Image (cartoon, helix red, strand yellow):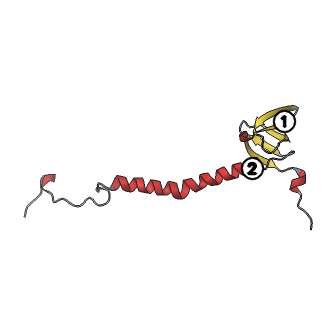
């Protein structure tokens, strides 16, 4: 009966997945797969929703800007990058891209059509 006193004398066991030289490539592949399946579609959907929100700004819509200003749209012309908003007694000219959320639609657009 022999006893193993040193690690060099122990028989080498295969390292499995974690000991493989291909393991870093496996991790990179998993991260890439996660990005393609989860992150990329979510990013595309958010960009599309934001573009739709900005394209559908109408006069009378109550909005929230990225600076935290809650205001009502006074003028929003199609094709222009700037809109005019009113908050309390102040009128501001801002870029469409700073609008984060439409809080409510104008009263005319909010009413359902009767058929």
Q: Seen in the image, is 83 located left or right of residue 36?
A: right
Indicate which disc, 1 or 2, sits on the residue closer to the N terminus.
2
Q: Seen in the image, is 84 located left or right of residue 40?
A: right
Q: Mark 1: which secondary structure?
A: strand
Which residue is located at x 21 percent, y 61 percent?
A: 13
- At which x and y percent is residue 37? 53, 59
Q: Seen in the image, is 104 located left or right of residue 51?
A: right
Query: Gap between marks 1 and 2, in whole Å?
Result: 20 Å
* Quarter of the view holding residue 19: bottom left
Q: Marks 1 and 2: CB-CB under 8 Å?
A: no
- At which x and y percent is residue 61? 84, 46
Q: Nearer the viewer, residue 12 or 39?
A: 39
- Say above or below: 88 vs 27: above
Q: How many marks?
A: 2
Quarter placement of the N terminus: bottom left
Of circles 1 and 2, the one toward us is 2
Which residue is labeled 2 in the image? 53
- At which x and y percent is residue 115? 92, 68
Which residue is labeled 1 in the image? 87
Q: Seen in the image, is 113 located left or right of residue 10?
A: right
């Amino acid at each position: 009966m022999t006893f193993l006193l040193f690690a060099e004398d122990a028989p080498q066991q295969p390292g499995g997945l974690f000991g493989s030289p291909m393991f870093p490539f496996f991790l990179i592949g998993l991260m890439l797969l996660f990005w393609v399946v989860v992150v990329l579609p979510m990013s595309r959907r958010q960009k599309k929703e934001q573009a739709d929100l900005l394209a559908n700004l109408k006069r009378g819509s109550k909005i929230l800007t990225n600076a935290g200003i809650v205001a009502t749209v006074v003028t929003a012309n199609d094709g222009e990058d700037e809109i005019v908003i009113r908050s309390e007694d102040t009128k501001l000219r801002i870029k469409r891209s700073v609008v984060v959320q439409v809080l409510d639609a104008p009263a005319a657009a909010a009413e359902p059509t009767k058929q």
